[in-house]
Image: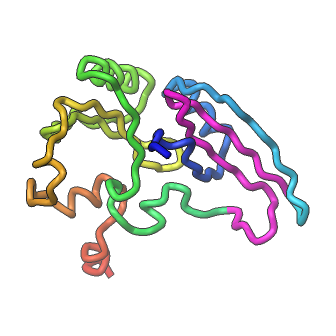
Amino acid sequence: MTNRGFSHIGLSTLDLDKTRDFYESVLKFKAVRCDILKVKEGGQIRHIFFDTGRDQLLAFMEARGVPDVPAHYEAGINRGLGVPSAFYHFAFEAGSEAALVEKRNELIARGVEVTDVVDHDWAKSIYFKDPNGLQLEFCCFTRNLNDDDARLQLRNEVSIRRMYMNAGIQSPAAAAKVS
């Protein structure tokens, strides 16, 4: 069997209505399947799949009154785990550098806080968060990847402090100093 990309990525939300509004109105992803699942033990799960392009889907589930599922939890993944926002994120294909800049301007016009365009040497990206606190990215390749790219090697230096600041949380070391 040949690899064909992903079918879908499943995530959770505490507010499916707000999530749907963001993904449809702001990102312009079309909802292609919407379900309400009745849970035998009580409650229900609302489930929506969004087409992110090329029939690759992003799905969100919202539990309502389901036994043993907490009513409140950190749906943003990174904050809940206490790790930098870069650790768990989802990148969507922008298609070109011009389209990336256009997408950035569209997001800003819709009131979304977006980073400047970041040059990674092989790709360029912009970063922002959804209403759940999930780190999202639009990205475009700026060159073809080669054998040297596939070799694990030191390429850059980053600040862990900055990575945590972007996540909206303190690093464990900074939090310990406050205590």
Q: Of 49 and 6, which appears nearest the observer?
A: 6
- Is 83 located above or below residue 50 in the figure? below
Give the residues drawn in magenta, as a range.
43-71
Q: Residue at x 9, y 54 (%)?
A: 156
- Is 87 located above or below residue 171 in the figure? above
- Is 1 located above or below residue 23 in the figure? below
Counting every numbered tag in the picture gives: 0
User: Would you identify the image quadrant in which residue 97 lies?
Assistant: top left
Q: Within the magenta stretch, is there residue 113?
A: no
- 8 displayed left or right of 62: left
Q: Quadrant of the C terminus?
A: bottom left
- 38 displayed left or right of 126: right
Q: Residue at x 18, y 33 (%)?
A: 144
- 37 displayed left or right of 27: right
Q: Residue at x 49, y 55 (%)?
A: 76
Colour scheme of the rendered structure: rainbow
Q: Within the magenta stretch, is there residue 51?
A: yes
Report x, y in % for residue 119: 16, 37
